Image (cartoon, helix red, strand yellow):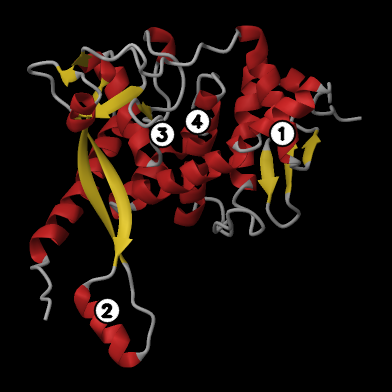
Amino acid sequence: MPHPAPAHRSFADRSSLYQEITDKIIRDLEQGRVPWVQPWANTATPLGLPKNAATGRAYSGVNILILWSAVAERGFTTQTWLTFRQALKIGAHVKNGEKGTTVVYADRFIPWRERQRAAETGDQPDAIPFLKRFTVFNTDQCEDLPAELAPAPAPTPDNLILPQAEALIRATGADIRIGGNRAFYVPSADYIQMPPLSAFFEPADFYRTALHECGHWVGHPSRCARDLSGSFGSPSYAREELIAEMTGAFVCAALSIAPTVRHADYLANWLEVLREDNRAIIRAASAASKAADYLLAFRGKAAAADSEGSGEIPEAA
């Protein structure tokens, strides 16, 4: 008969990992560094989402924040990463003395005792979330990289960046109403209200704000179905704003628009949420990744519509 492994060590390690990640995010926020808004203009790193150099897969969730922070703090020039074994497998190796960056893999498992209980009672077994650590190295930290390793994509020409954002937003089919002096999303009526482009200091801010509101729009029950019921100032409202902030930042980075903080006034609320729940940032970053993926999936449709000259988001009449 199989016997479950002692659980206390793995549970303690998992709890410690949640706390380590949360403590790092809290320290950054307390020092005025927002993890999803890095000083890209002051680095040689191209804008974009971090990817695994061997598989080409993009990292997601809190790993984006972890790897962006490592790039900014350590001055790496690429957004591509490898594990030690992956480097060896492709004929490369990590330079002597290099220190890796810890990323996490999140999943769920059903303990043996829970499986047994569910089998005896006929209930559905309850799964327990877990995190597993991995160490990765930026490709700047590796030598003898093969020439065929996928190079970083060429940067989007400046004159195409905002048109791409425009096309993506239109392709979502979101009901966007132009007018007034405030930007917000109305879940009950499922529409986004935006001030006219002329009300913003620079055009990019219009699209940053629109993508933030699209982050809320994705949470509608007919899409990603998040809890949008929180009243202003409540913890659930702060959590939703945190998700929308990161969603906007992830999409902006993917579109070569430097992310900025859209709601710095919520900083105290975010800190309170993170201090009370050391899993909050993991959940929020995961939800933001799902929302960003949802929005970025419209890029193919946006490219097709753009080639047909579908125009701009209409201004108010």
Amino acid type shown at disc 2: Arg
Q: Which residue is mark 4?
A: 249
Give the side of residue 123 with respect to residue 82, left or right: right
Q: Earlier in the sequence, mark 3 or mark 1?
A: 3
> Is label 3 or label 4 in front?
3
Q: Which residue is mark 1?
A: 301
Q: Residue at x 35, y 16 (%)?
A: 78
> Is label 4 or label 2 in front?
2
Quarter of the image where the N terminus is located:
bottom left
Q: Is residue 196 visible?
A: no
- Answer few, some or many: residues within 10 Å of disc 1's Cα (few below 14, many 20 plus, some between 14 and 19): some
Q: Mark 4: which secondary structure?
A: helix
Q: Earlier in the sequence, mark 1 or mark 2?
A: 2
Amino acid type shown at disc 1: Lys
Q: Nearer the viewer, residue 187 or 304?
A: 304
* Residues at discs 4 and 2 in contact (Cβ within 8 Å): no
Q: Earlier in the sequence, mark 4 or mark 1?
A: 4
From the top left corner, tell me how far across and down residue 22 is, in percent: 27, 43
Q: Which residue is mark 3?
A: 57
Compute the Cα span from label 4 to label 2.
40 Å
Q: Which residue is mark 2?
A: 115
Q: Earlier in the sequence, mark 3 or mark 4?
A: 3
Give the side of residue 166 with respect to residue 315, left or right: left
Amino acid type shown at disc 4: Ala
> Is label 4 or label 1 in front?
1
Compute the Cα span from label 3 to label 1.
22 Å
Residue 121, above or below 12: below
